[in-house]
Image (spheres, helix red, strand yellow):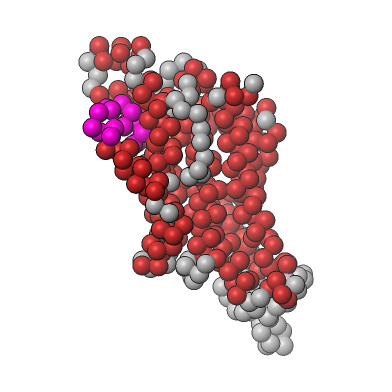
Amino acid sequence: MRGSVLPQAPDTALAIGRPRTNVFKSVSRSLGAVFSVARRDPYAAVGLVIYAGFALIAIFADQLIHNDPLEILFTPDYDLARNLPPSQDFWLGTTYSGRDIYSQLIMGTRSALIVGLTAALCVVAIGTVIGLISGYFRGWVDTLLMRIADIALGVPFLPFVIVLAAFLQPSQWNVVIGIALLLWPNSARVIRAQVMSLRERAFVEAARVTGAGPWRILFIHVAPNVLALSFLYASVAVGWAILTEASISFLGFGPSDTVSWGYMLQDAYASQALGRGQYYWFVPPGLCIIAIVVAGFFISRGYEEILFPKLKA
């Protein structure tokens, strides 16, 4: 996502419809556009189904698990249930420490979506607000905000998040903070370019003539017309945030009291699951990470056709 390049100043207002002046209606239309493109684009439909499936698993995780994911289990003979293969009692077997892998996978879905959705919301919110302010006011405000964006883009992302997690208490929220601090410039730059185009439109001039102040114009008249771009970035940011959290946990900087897919991979690696041939331990969380990242790409691919219809040709 940090290296992604999207067309500058795309005419989303024309691509999606007439200029909008209601934020809530714009949000509902942007969400509706996701379902609309899913009906036309099979890739977007697949991505939406994957997201919906993971969301249902996360919501009903407590009802789907058999055991506490961090509970150490024992066999009926009071032996440690260590490295057991998949069975009727343990659908994905158990870990070296005697924990249920299936329960960890299910609860890891909830952790992944919490991190992904929260981080995506923070990234898009910061990027949208800064892009709006920078593009509308221009001048020294634009220069200052874009220089801050340049600094954020110049900071190595993964090392920064690792250092942040190392100095602060290991927590998923520290990962969210690191993602939010460094990943907003991409969306801010594109939204800024769009706002610089919109501020010269007739409906903005009409709002100025009626006496509307700059902040009212910015958030009531301009903002609804760039929310579609925000949703595009959000669909990609979810997968990127989940991948980042998994990387941090795999490197051992994640919280030890919270089960995540990265935690499972790190535990499997430390226990030499690959050498033992315990593919049922590390393959499922790896596939889940791949699936949710690909799902975000599929949705953004289809959604992009609405924002940039000329690119399809």
Q: Main secondary structure of the magenta part?
A: helix
Could you tell me residue 306's position as x and y percent? 57, 25
- The quarter of the picture where residue 300 lies is top right
Could you tell me residue 186's position as x and y percent? 44, 39
Could you tell me residue 120's position as x and y percent? 47, 45
User: Residue lying furthest front in this view?
Assistant: 154
Using the image as rendered, state which of residue 76 and residue 115 is in the foreground: 115
Residue at x-position 62% and y-position 79%: 97
| Quadrant containing the C terminus in the rendered view | top right
Magenta-colored stretch includes residue 141: yes
Residue at x-position 26% and y-position 15%: 208
From the viewer's perspective, tell me whether residue 250 is left or right of residue 218: right
Tell me where the magenta segment starts and ends, as one range.
129-143
From the viewer's perspective, tell me whether residue 56 is left or right of residue 92: left
From the viewer's perspective, tell me whether residue 152 is left or right of residue 289: left
- Vertical placement of residue 244 versus 27, above or below: below
Residue at x-position 66% and y-position 76%: 272
Residue at x-position 52% and y-position 67%: 251
Magenta-colored stretch includes residue 242: no
- The quarter of the picture where residue 215 lies is top left
